[in-house]
Image (tube, rainbow, N blue to C red):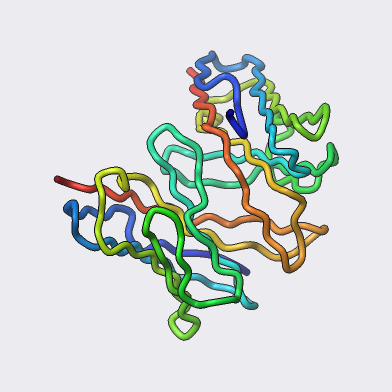
Amino acid sequence: AQSVTQLDSHVSVSEGTPVLLRCNYSSSYSPSLFWYVQHPNKGLQLLLKYTSAATLVKGINGFEAEFKKSETSFHLTKPSAHMSDAAEYFCVVRGPYSGGYNKLIFGAGTRLAVHP
Amino acid sequence: DTAVSQTPKYLVTQMGNDKSIKCEQNLGHDTMYWYKQDSKKFLKIMFSYNNKELIINETVPNRFSPKSPDKAHLNLHINSLELGDSAVYFCASSQAQGGSSYNEQFFGPGTRLTVL
């Protein structure tokens, strides 16, 4: 079965320092993986997606993630945090194809706090 | 222009009442979804409709009934509200998906339901 585990429920960084949000996945086949961001009182927005093309995926707002099959990881990084990056981040795996469709399976989320 | 909109944004009601949440998308998408996000931010799909046809129906109490009058609208009606129904409910939409393809899901801003 497909699943994702976000290793940190909270991450706190200073503005201008690197961001690392960790995600491990479990999948019985080549996975499709995504990172979504949820700003306070807002809906979710897709940051980036991996669908078996390049293993280093670049997303919006300077974020990127690297798919590492040997480590079953899909960590999200950003070289320099900005105050506006403070939000909840979700690692997501596409579930099995069933009934003609795929469900998204969400991780528990990581809350990123950015301090001045 | 709002891509996926939900009304109301906040809903406070008493146990035992019946309430509805409305969702509309102006993206021309074929597929719409309802998700529930609990107090720990865990996000789980409830329903999905494609062209007014129910395609995903997770283990959700019968008190929850989605209705799709057309492919641009997916409403959620909840009967006999319980305390445990308190959550944020997100509507989302995407182009039809399945198999090896993935189409980004666009989320609405959420409806925060509080049952007293």
Residue lying at 62% horizontally and 55% vertically, measured from the top left: A104
Task: Tally the marks.
Answer: 0
User: A77 or A2, which lies in front?
Assistant: A77
- Residue B13 lies, in percent from the top left, at 53, 14
Q: Is residue B28 left or right of residue A104?
A: right
| Residue A46 spot, x, y in % from top left | 52, 51
Establish if B98 lies above or below A85: below
What residue sits 43% from the left and 73% below the top?
A66
Classify residue A86 as left or right of residue B8.
left
Q: Is residue A100 left or right of residue A75?
A: right
Horizontal and vertical percent position of residue B4: 62, 33
Residue, far left: A116
Closer-to-camera residue (B28/B55): B28
Q: Is residue A108 above or below residue A57?
A: above
Q: Quadrant of the C terminus of chain A?
A: top left
Q: Position of residue A42 (x, y in %)?
A: 45, 35
Most extreme residue toward the front, as rendered? B1
**Quadrant of residue A96 within the rendered picture:** bottom right
Q: Viewer-proximal residue, B10 or B108?
A: B108
Frontmost residue, B37 versus A101: A101
Q: Is residue B82 left or right of residue B62?
A: left
Quadrant showing the N terminus of chain A: bottom right
Q: Quadrant of residue B20?
A: top right
Residue placed farthest to the bottom in the image? A70
Q: Is residue B65 visible?
A: no
Above or below, A52 against A22 in this view is below
Q: Is residue A83 among the parts visible in the rendering?
A: yes
